[in-house]
Image (spheres, rainbow, N blue to C red):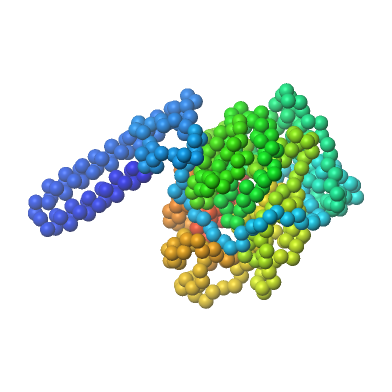
Amino acid sequence: MRKFNKTLITIFLLTSTQAILSAQTSNQSSGYLFYSLLGVGVLVALGAIITLADNLLKVEASKVGIDVFKKDIGILPSLSNYLTGKKPEFVGENSYHKLTRGYDLKLSGQASGAVEDVRVTRFAVCPTDFRGMSPIPKVVVEVGDTVKAGDALFFDKKNPEVIYTAPVSGEIIEVNRGEKRSIIEVVILADLVQQHKVFSVPSASASRTEITQFLQESGAWALLNQRPYDIVPPIGDIPRDIYISTFDTAPLAPDANVIISGKEVYFQKGLEVLGLLTSGSVHLGLDGRKPESVSSAFTQATGVAKHWFAGKHPAGNVGVQIHHTKPIKSGQNVWTLGVQEVISIGKLFSDGVLDCTRIVALAGSKLSAPKYVRTYVGAQIGELLGGIIKEDGKDSRIISGDVLSGKQKTTNQYLGYKDDQVTVIAEGNEYELFGWLLPIKPRPSISNTFPNFLFPDYKFEGDTNTHGEARAFVVSGQYEEVLPMNIYPQHLMKAILANDFEKMEGLGIQELSEEDIALCEFVCTSKIPLQKILREGLDMVQSQG
């Protein structure tokens, strides 16, 4: 309906221009001009009234429990029903969403080939990877202690029921502290042959309470993520729904088909367990861009609701998928997981061990051999990369995650708890003469100043240079071009900066996470740190209860 209104306004402007030009060449055109403007004005007013009535009807339908996103509720049938045509045959009875907004940041250095085993000796669990945790959690091990994979390392003093466990077996060699004696790392020197703590798995008839207690005691509860706020779910919360995206559209992201290979049974078991934890449904987001290559573990999964998504990045973001299927409303929460976290839960309930094995994509233009490796949660970055960073005289930026929303790391630091990608690109501390004036060097950009649109498959060697400093925060419309959500990100950011809680909630802050707004930050002409601002806003809203 918003596009319908824009179309009416365009017609109004074109008709007005035509009428004015005609009036200059004919004395009889004044009547035509008047009635043309009157007719188009009435049409625009009628469209506005219909839009308002349509929105009010949807609000009232939502109040009585009708899912307006599954049923075509409104004054008139949705125009998308006519414009998009029939759903593709591969969709079947599932929903299909073709997103028209977004941008694919194409970089060189995609991981490929068979998964390799890599020898890493040091692993760490970092309390800072978990939002909302006390700066100084209760550490239950000491340097010199030996642990098995699954043994307790620490717990949050605010939620002592949730145990954070060791991803590998070995010896505790460091408990590193940061500012004000906060715990930043618990480091394990891994055994050559891994040993796992074996848990007693609840029976098939176990209650939800027994299952949640088992997840908390085994350390698997930390694999869950609650939205809004992206936190480990509080004890006692029941999610409205649980969402898993089975594909990632971020730059150089790993292929989920590589990850799932050989673990299909555990994935299905994990889905069955998750189905017992929610009052709603478990939802799978499927890759509608290349449906023929999607693993049968995803397309044939049972006991879940499936949704196909086609479009550019961020179509693979779970936040975008939630928005287009069943948005998060005030007072609601949903849980999200990655494919590898689901596999870990499935193996825990099948074999009684918490297996934190991870397939990680080592990617980026600064790597001599981008590849997939098999390791465990919290692997040391330097050992993971194992000397494959190019020595070309340029500094490197190591990122745990993707280039848009990942965190900068050093070789002495560790893989993020839920990261499955390490990206290495050039630092970008070399400057171009008149680079702001002459578009000499090719670079990824949504601007047609650079002829990128002429070479749609060209892959860039990206770097971290922002090509400019922070500027005035002006309305440009760039964010809306790349964010496929019915949210006004620029207005939201300004509401956060103004500490306007009502506007923040009204503008949809609870639907967003940093990864959803990361592409907006990339295209931002004003060079505004949108992800940082969004996190501050989420923390403010959370603190208000």
Q: Residue at x 16, y 44 (%)?
A: 35
Q: Give the side of residue 87 with respect to residue 368, left or right.
A: left
Would residue 174 appear left or right of 422 to someone viewing this image? right
Give the farthest residue toward the right.
144
112 is higher (above) or lower (below) than 8? below
Q: Is residue 200 above or below residue 511?
A: above
Residue 441 in view in this figure = yes
Note whether 448 is above or below 27 in the view shown.
below
Residue 165 coordinates in the image, percent (x, y): 79, 42
Q: Is residue 523 toward the left or the right of residue 345 in the image?
A: left
Which residue is rendered at x = 73% and y = 25% of the image?
A: 204
Pick the quarter of the image with the N terminus.
top left
- What is the quadrant of residue 61 in the picture? top left
Asked whether 92 or 477 is in front, the reply is: 92
Which part of the image, by quadrant, shows the C terminus?
top right
Q: Residue furthest bottom?
A: 433
Count of picture labels: 0
- From the top left corner, tell me how far across and down residue 429 is, in percent: 61, 70
Front one among 264 and 140: 264
Query: Residue drawn at (86%, 49%), measured in percent from left and top?
Result: 193
- 381 relative to 166, above or below: below
- Res. 499 visible in picture: no
Which residue is at the front of the view, 523 or 273? 273
Report x, y in % for residue 194. Answer: 84, 47
Residue name at image x 64 percent, y 58 percent: 111
Q: Quadrant of residue 278?
A: top right
Q: Position of residue 270 (x, y in %)?
A: 68, 36
Q: Nearer the viewer, residue 247 or 492?
A: 247
